[in-house]
Amino acid sequence: MIEANYSDDTWYEATADRGAQRDALAGAAEAEACVIGGGLAGLTTALELARAGASVMLLEARRIAWGASGRNGGFVSNGFAEGMDQIASRVGLEEARALYRLSREGTEYVRREIARGDPSIKMGEGWQGCIRYDNAGEKKAGIAAMARDFGQEMDFLDVAETRARVNTPRYFQSSYDPTAFHMHPLRYALMIAKTAEAAGARLFEMSPAVSVRKAGDGWRVATAAGEVHCRHVVYCVSSLDRTLHGATGRAILPVATYVAVTEPLTQDAIRTRSAISDSRRAGNYYRLVDEGRLLWGGAITTRVSAPARLAERMKADMLSVFPSLGNPKIDYAWAGLMGYARHFMPLIGTDGQGQWWATAFGGHGMNTTAMGGILMA
């Protein structure tokens, strides 16, 4: 297991109510399915299995959504980390369309669960994707291709329209996706956990799985203080444990990204409540939250601990785009570790012997973890 030295002092933790810590697994137990990992892929799998009437237990090594699921940018949209043009060139247009439909189902699932459980988790509508170079033709062509090939409608914003929403000379044209939205990812994960428990799933925290071994027609999943005998094991551990399921684990590359949240601001640089990103390599992604705070994400590394002076680095990054912000105080800064596969697509499958995996959701995980959980169930 990777020991990621990450702070729990995040804006998400400060604005969510975790409640009492769940019990650790102790002693022997039985279930039809044991889900390893309490991020969004594991939680959605547990919820949908329980809704289908299966007995399911979930083991989380730390707290629910301690990893990337509870510390990401909170953007929810159709698609994958890999671009749809690249996916189509690899698998063909019809297969790419089928994949895109699955990704859309993930987005719709998240939207539906929030509406059903707690609408206040959603924090804004739409996603504006800005380019840092002047090329209206390229942007229009990309929008047209998404509409033609995948039925994804987006609006084109010219330079004036773009800068009316994000007041910076760094940006030129942009696209606007009205089907996307942004939310509080930790509160969403905690809601899904409680919904899963209400449906009959049993969730355990501080219960890292240390071994999985074949036992008759099923499997035994061991922790330090207990074990689960089950018919099916679902691995949803992503970047934080690459050893439990050998081949899949070795295929995961841990990649860190970083987020900072300012004090409440009075500013005229960002004039939209939509999610925003840009075309910079390892691009910036950001949004206004709470009482006018700016949540700013960006940069990627392969570190498993936050770099020194993270808050200052993140502030310098945001001021390079919006110098008019002046000298905002950074109230929170943190790192999060994502799991990527080499092809920038999720890894979802089974070995046909009762072992299943749903992992590698890095870079576009809010909809694809929901998609993965649905497919697992």
Image (tube, grey):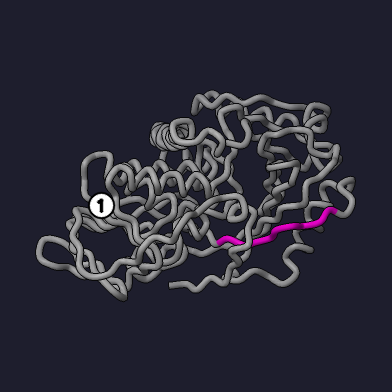
Secondary element at tag 1: strand
Residue 23: quarter of image = bottom left
Position above or below: 152 against 267: above
Residue closest to the far front: 20
- Let me know if residue 331 is in the magenta part: yes
Q: Which residue is more in the foreground, 179 or 84? A: 179
The image position of residue 202, as x and y in percent, is 30, 54
Asked if residue 55 can be seen in this view, the reply is yes
Q: Quadrant of the N terminus?
A: bottom left
Question: Residue sitting at 85 percent across and 37 percent down?
Answer: 268
Asked if residue 291 lies in the magenta stretch, the reply is no
State the residue position of label 1. Answer: 56
Q: Position of residue 288 (x, y in %)?
A: 71, 41
* In this view, 157 is above or below 225: above
Circle 1 residues within 10 Å: few <14, some 14–19, many ≥20: many
Q: Quadrant of the C terminus?
A: top left
Tell me which secondary structure the magenta stretch mostly adopts. strand
Q: Is residue 255 left or right of residue 43?
A: right
Q: Is residue 24 above or below residue 173?
A: below
Is residue 283 toward the left or the right of residue 58 in the image?
Answer: right
| Extreme residue in the bottom direction | 224
> Which region is colored magenta?
328-336
Query: Would you identify the image quadrant in which residue 243 lies?
Result: bottom left
- At label 1, the amino acid type is Val
Q: Position of residue 75 (x, y in %)?
A: 58, 42
